[in-house]
Amino acid sequence: MNFLLRGGIALSIAISSFTGIAQSQDAIQPERYTQHNKGKFYFYWGGNRETYSKSDIHFEGANYNFTVHDATGHDKPKGWHCDYINPANMTIPQTNFRMGYFISDHYNISIGLDHMKYVMTQHQTAIVNGYINLPSNEIGSMFNGIYQGTPVNFGQNFTGFDDTTPPPFLTFEHTDGLNYVNTEFSRVDDISSLFTIKNTDKIQINITEGIGAGILYPKTNARVLGKQRHDDFHVAGYGIAAKVGLNLTLFKYFFIQTELKGGYIDMPDIITTHNGPDRASQHFFFLQKIIAFGGIFRI
């Protein structure tokens, strides 16, 4: 009986000692920087490619009012180029800048600029409805008439007027650019365990999803019926979007992030020429592919 009692006491002491050692070891394990996000700031810079749906583009001004139906448009990629990191030329390619703050371990709010580009495709034939009745001394009067489901060929990109080359019916692009200034609310989840990654301070893999909204602040380059372009920045409308992305964080502070973002843009007030009442309106869906490089830190 004494033997059993002594054995039980010894076993209890051994278990307590083992538990204490384990707890002590756990207590001295440092908390990983990547274990919590709350209170961290982040920023990134990158590039994008876009795909756009067809759209109806309405043009209205003194002595004309017409709509181009189902116009196609495309982006204007720069490709892999040093302009993405050249401070003097960083706004030339299609770029993305974003900075944000984690309000909890999983959720963050951010502001950013998606500098996209939109070019109405030349060499396309589109249906036009409306009328043009310009004074005969204006160069665009050659297009005067009533358009009722009339197919119009938009020909080649316009480079300038001369005595032998007639003006195009229309060229239209947001190439400096289709600027989407927006706020996003996003969630981030660490999925490193799915890849058996244990030390996330060296490599961490996250997925992110978010929604956002903002204004469109384009610089529109338009030649409407031969008129001089306006080509100044102007708040033209709004956009909404949703995104999903994959984030690879390296050595706690640096990351590469890819995103797929889709949304809707509505611009009811696009300035086209220096003639005050001349306006265009357009709405369409877009799909944006982004790759960006950034950092995440606590202040």
Image (cartoon, helix red, strand yellow):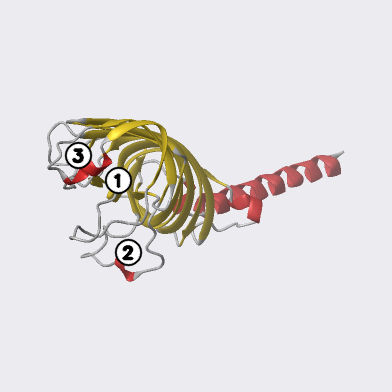
How would you rate the neighbour count of disc 1 (Cα within 10 Å): few for under 14, some for 14-19, many for 20 or more? many
Q: Amino acid at mark 3?
A: His
Please identify, in this view, whether the residue under mark 3 or under mark 1 is nearer the observer: 1
How many angstroms separate mark 3 from mark 1 (CA)? 20 Å
Q: Quadrant of the N terminus?
A: top right
The numbered mark, 2 or 1, whose residue comes first in the sequence reads 2
How would you rate the neighbour count of disc 2 (Cα within 10 Å): few for under 14, some for 14-19, many for 20 or more? many
Rendered residue at 22%/61% (across/down): 164
Which residue has dot 3 on it?
A: 234
Which residue has dot 1 on it?
A: 170
Pointers 2 and 3 in contact (C-beta within 8 Å): no
Write down the quadrant of residue 49 in the picture: bottom left
Helix, strand or loop at mark 1: strand
Count of marks overlaid on the render: 3
Q: Amino acid at mark 2?
A: Tyr
How many angstroms separate mark 2 from mark 1 (CA)? 31 Å
How many angstroms separate mark 2 from mark 3 (CA)? 24 Å
Helix, strand or loop at mark 3: loop
What is the x, y in percent for residue 236? 25, 35
What is the x, y in percent for residue 292? 41, 56
Rendered residue at 41%/67% (across/down): 80
Rendered residue at 14%/36% (across/down): 135
Q: With 276 as the anchor, is 298 left or right in this view?
A: right
Q: With 157 as the anchor, is 252 left or right in this view?
A: right
Rendered residue at 46%/54% (across/down): 257
Q: Amino acid at mark 1?
A: Leu
Which residue has dot 2 on it?
A: 84
